[in-house]
Image (tube, helix red, strand yellow):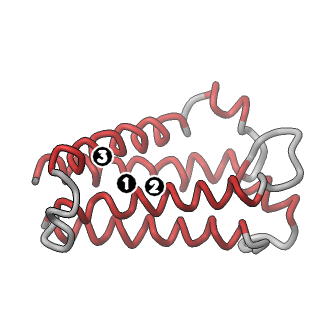
Amino acid sequence: MLTAISILLFLVLAGIAGLHAYWALGGLWPCHDEASLVRTVVGTKHRSVMPPVWLTFVVAALIFAAALVPLFVTPILKGALPPMLAYSGLAVLAAIFVVRGVLAFTTAFHRRHGTEPFATLDRRIYGPLCLVIGTGYLALLALA
């Protein structure tokens, strides 16, 4: 079960990291232009261009790093990191994803990121996905 959860988290987060790298390279999916992409995936009011390329790549790299952490408590990469560092990483990532998931349902977060369709997508997809990912990290902590 531990390995299955770890691989699933890896696949989901690696896909999300890949999507961020695609956007950094100028990709527009799931939209047709940059302004609509900003409204859909960034949601910050008064912004019509994507964040800088370097920043989007940094986000992609951080998400990919988060994807790798669960593998360090499985036979796949066990021992590649000191156990304390691997378990601390799981705990920190669990907290980050749970907090981000909860923020999707707060008015304070949507005052800053309230542009549609981001606000609706955040409540329906992004926030719940973050909660599921955070729960996956918590499950790994309980199973490891």
Q: Position of residue 140 (x, y in %)?
A: 19, 53
Q: Position of residue 33 (x, y in %)?
A: 87, 69
Task: Classify 10 Å Cα crowding around label 2: few (below 14), some (14-19), many (20 and above).
Answer: some
**Residue matched to label 1:** 133
Task: Give me the residue at 39% from left, 73% from top.
Answer: 11
**Residue matched to label 2:** 129
> For the residue marked with disc 3, what is the amino acid?
Gly
* Residue 4, above or below 43: below
The outermost residue toward the top is: 108
- Image quadrant in which you'd find residue 67: bottom left
Please, what secondary structure does the residue beneath circle 3 have?
helix
Task: Give me the residue at 74% from left, 57% from top.
Answer: 40
- Which of the two discs, 3 and 2, sits closer to the camera? 3
How far apart are the two marked residues, 3 and 2, measured between alpha carbons?
A: 19 Å
Task: Classify 10 Å Cα crowding around label 1: few (below 14), some (14-19), many (20 and above).
Answer: many
Looking at the rendered structure, which numbered label has been put on residue 89? Answer: 3
Please, what secondary structure does the residue beneath circle 2 have?
helix
How far apart are the two marked residues, 3 and 1, measured between alpha carbons?
A: 14 Å
